[in-house]
Amino acid sequence: MSKLCVVVCGCLFLLLKGISTLELNSYSACYGILHENFLKPSCSTGEKMAVVGLSSLAKEISTSCPIQIVAVNASTDRCCEYNPIDCIIRYEGSTYRAYYQKCNGNTECSIQVSWVPTTTCNQTVYLARTNYMKMDYYCISNQGLNPCSSLNTKRQQSFPVEPWIPFILSNRIFILHMLN
C-alpha cells in the first residue's frame, strides 16, 4: 500500500508542477449578427483546452457600446474587450455544462455568443443585457495531461477515477481531463 501511495503522490506532484507554469488565456467576442459573434479559443498543436471560466458581460451605458453588433465595419474592439468594471454574469452549474464540454479537451472550438439579462447588475449603469462573452482557459500539453500513464507497477489494481478531476491551486479551480 505504501508503494501505491508513493506512486499516486508522485503523479499528483508531477501534474501540479506542470499546472503551476501554465498561462491563463482569454478570448472574448461581441454579441451580434455577423460572423465575428463566436468565441473561437484555440491552443497549439499538441495541446488541449481546460476551460476554467465562461462569462457573459455588459459594458456601462456611458461607453455607448451597442447591445448587438450589426455593421461590418463597426469599430467595436473596446466593446468586446474585458474590463474588470463590466457587469459579469458567470456561466456556472449544469445549465451551462454544454458550453464547457464543447471546448474542454479540444485543441479549438467555436461557441456562438449569447446574451442574458443584466438584472443582477445596476440597470441605471449597465446595458439591459450582456453584449459580449469571455472564456478563460489553459492550454495543456497532451503529454502533461496524464503524467502517470506510462508508469508500470507490479500490482495490477484498478481505481475508479472520474474523467474530470478538480484541483485547487492558487485559489483557482483547474479542471483537467485525464486521458486514458
Image (spheres, rainbow, N blue to C red):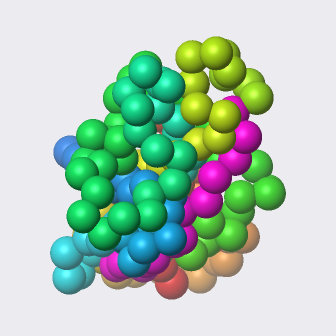
Outermost residue toward the right in this view: 95
**x, y (%) of residue 97?**
70, 62
Along the viewing direction, whichever of 170 and 157 lies nearer the viewer: 170
**x, y (%) of residue 128?**
66, 34
Residue positioned 68% across, 69% down in the render: 98
Position of 12 compared to 97: left or right?
A: left
Residue positioned 68% across, 21% down in the render: 123
Along the viewing direction, whichever of 63 and 30 lies nearer the viewer: 63
Per the image, is 108 magenta? Answer: yes
Residue positioned 40% across, 32% down in the render: 64
In which quarter of the view is residue 84 placed? top left
Position of 121 compared to 18: left or right?
A: right
**x, y (%) of residue 1?**
60, 56
Q: Main secondary structure of the magenta part?
A: loop
Per the image, is 158 magenta? Answer: no
**x, y (%) of residue 109?**
43, 77
All told, the count of numbered labels is 0
Identify whether 132 is placed above or below 37: above
Identify whether 66 is placed above or below 70: above
Q: Is residue 12 visible?
A: no
Q: What stretch of residues is rendered in magenta?
A: 106-118
Identify whether 140 is placed above or below 20: below
Q: Is residue 36 visible?
A: yes
